[in-house]
């Protein structure tokens, strides 16, 4: 018996090498959030070439492609397009050498270090296969290419730019992310999947003076150091061991020379939590500790705490996740798994939220399975397998791309009519 997924995916052999070329091309031409002009054009051209009704420029560079194929359910599949300010160190023949000039005039390296080039390639492939096999399904398939996921504002930008009135309302929204797991792996998870993420920029104020005269100063370097240490107790001493959370101070800046006590220090940190209660508990604790440490140090001015980015938690709806998990089990067999809770974050859920519809979001592997297995045998996965955002994150072409195309197609067909 041939099922519909097998019928639709029978077209994959003919487009595989073209998709691999597209992936390499996207990988060597990464673009930062809201700058995805070239990527968006590639996606839009590919959709148009196979008969989609295409709208470009939604929320900046977002692309919407609609393929109406008779009465039936509407499925929206979303891919993010943006890259990161990372200098690539993969050594791949198609590695990025791209740099851009940032707002301060500095040269920034750019790399697809999160694998969004995989997502764009896989959705492009899936969209094409759906168009070529219209006899195998009924309904409407919507391909959505979103800008600026890394900054947490691309989904919102598309929604603010009228996405819900420009697209048919989907019955479900589907999305996937390549992760540091063996290529070929697909993993679903009902309920909590990705954390909420909040980034804060904290400025603490001291009083500058000569390095030889601490009595004339209020030293913001010491103040910042005490804050950084004390913040380590929020997760370890204030949350229950059963409540997952991460608090990372990723940046501390103060001063410019060895013998000058500066007048301020800037701390940037990131918080990951999985529900609203722990999220506000951690954010409240940060404010309390920062304020108290500044007072303890005789700071002449209260600290400024500014939220620079904010991602919602990604909580998969149960029913659609079960439906996709069943379809994956039937198609992928032993490669279909239940995936662990992840500490990364996503803004994708803003899209289904705006439509008022459920969603499910899953992970696919991108690491050479032999390399992963060896690291697992040695107990060195954390050291030897590069993770997303690392300058050496380099998904293998296959079976990563085949798996991503297949997963999106199989999931979409779990809704679309026969
Ligand atoms: Zn990322
Ligand atoms: Zn990502």
Image: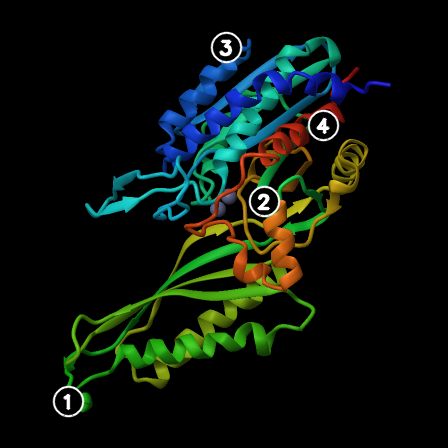
Q: Is residue 377 something that shows in the picture?
A: yes
**Mark 1 residue element:** loop
Q: Which mark is residue 49?
A: 3
Q: Nearer the viewer, residue 275 or 369?
A: 369
Residue beneath the point at 48% across and 44% down = 394
Residue beneath the point at 37% across and 46% down = 88
**Left or right: 320 with respect to 87?**
right
The mark that comes first in sequence, 4 or 3, is 3
Residue beneath the point at 49% across and 16% down = 46
The mark that comes first in sequence, 1 or 3, is 3
The mark that comes first in sequence, 1 or 2, is 1
The spot of residue 125 in percent (x, y) is 57, 22
User: Does the residue tagged 1 have its C-beta within 8 Å of any atom of ligand 1?
Assistant: no
Q: Which mark is residue 368?
A: 2
**Left or right: 412 with respect to 313?**
right
Is disc 3 surrounded by few (<14), some (14 to 19) or many (20+) residues within 10 Å?
few
Q: Nearer the viewer, residue 98 or 232?
A: 98
- Give the foreground label among 1 and 2: 2
The mark that comes first in sequence, 1 or 4, is 1
**Mark 4 residue element:** helix
Marks 4 and 3, Cα distance to the nearest angstrom? 22 Å
The mark that comes first in sequence, 2 or 4, is 2
- Name the residue beneath numbered marker 1: 213
**Left or right: 390 with respect to 407?**
left
Q: Is residue 275 something that shows in the picture?
A: no
The spot of residue 248 in percent (x, y) is 47, 65
The spot of residue 160 in percent (x, y) is 46, 32
- Name the residue beneath numbered marker 4: 410
User: Does the residue tagged 2 have its C-beta within 8 Å of any atom of ligand 2?
Assistant: no
């Amino acid at each position: 018996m041939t099922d519909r997924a097998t019928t639709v995916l029978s077209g994959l052999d003919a487009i595989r090498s073209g998709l691999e070329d597209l992936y390499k091309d996207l990988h060597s031409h990464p673009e930062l959030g809201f700058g995805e002009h070239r990527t968006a054009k590639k996606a839009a051209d590919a959709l148009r070439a196979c008969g989609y009704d295409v709208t470009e420029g939604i929320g900046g560079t977002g692309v919407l492609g609609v393929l109406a194929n008779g009465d039936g359910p509407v499925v929206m599949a979303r891919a993010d397009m943006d890259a990161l300010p990372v200098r690539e160190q993969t050594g791949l023949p198609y590695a990025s050498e791209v740099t851009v000039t940032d707002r301060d005039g500095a040269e920034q390296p750019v790399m697809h270090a999160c694998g969004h080039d995989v997502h764009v390639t896989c959705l492009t492939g899936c969209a094409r296969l759906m168009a070529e096999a219209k006899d195998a399904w009924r309904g409407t398939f919507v391909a959505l290419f979103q800008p600026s996921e890394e900054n947490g504002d691309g989904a919102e930008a598309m929604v603010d730019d009228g996405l819900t009135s420009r697209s048919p309302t989907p019955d479900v929204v589907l999305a996937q992310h390549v992760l540091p797991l063996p290529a070929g792996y697909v993993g679903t998870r009902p309920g909590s999947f990705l954390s909420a993420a909040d980034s804060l920029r904290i400025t603490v104020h001291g009083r500058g003076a000569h390095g030889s005269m601490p009595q004339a100063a209020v030293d913001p370097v010491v103040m910042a150091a005490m804050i950084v240490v004390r913040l380590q107790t929020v997760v370890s001493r204030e949350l229950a061991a059963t409540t997952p959370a991460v608090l990372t101070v990723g940046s501390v800046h103060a001063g410019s020379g060895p013998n000058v006590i500066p007048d301020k220090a800037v701390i940037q940190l990131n918080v990951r939590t999985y529900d609203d209660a722990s999220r506000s508990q951690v954010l409240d604790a940060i404010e309390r500790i920062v304020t108290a440490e500044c007072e303890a140090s005789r700071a002449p001015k209260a600290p400024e705490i500014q939220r620079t980015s904010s991602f919602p938690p990604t909580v998969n709806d149960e029913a659609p996740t079960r439906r996709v998990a069943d379809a994956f089990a039937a198609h992928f067999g032993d490669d279909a798994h239940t995936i662990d809770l992840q500490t990364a974050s996503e803004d994708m859920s803003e899209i289904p939220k705006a439509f008022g519809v459920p969603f499910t979001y899953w992970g696919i592997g991108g690491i050479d399975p032999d390399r992963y297995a060896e690291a697992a045998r040695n107990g060195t996965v954390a050291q030897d397998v590069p993770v997303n955002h690392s300058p050496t994150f380099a998904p293998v072409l296959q079976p990563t791309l085949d798996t991503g195309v297949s997963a999106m197609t199989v999931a979409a067909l779990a809704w679309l009519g026969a």
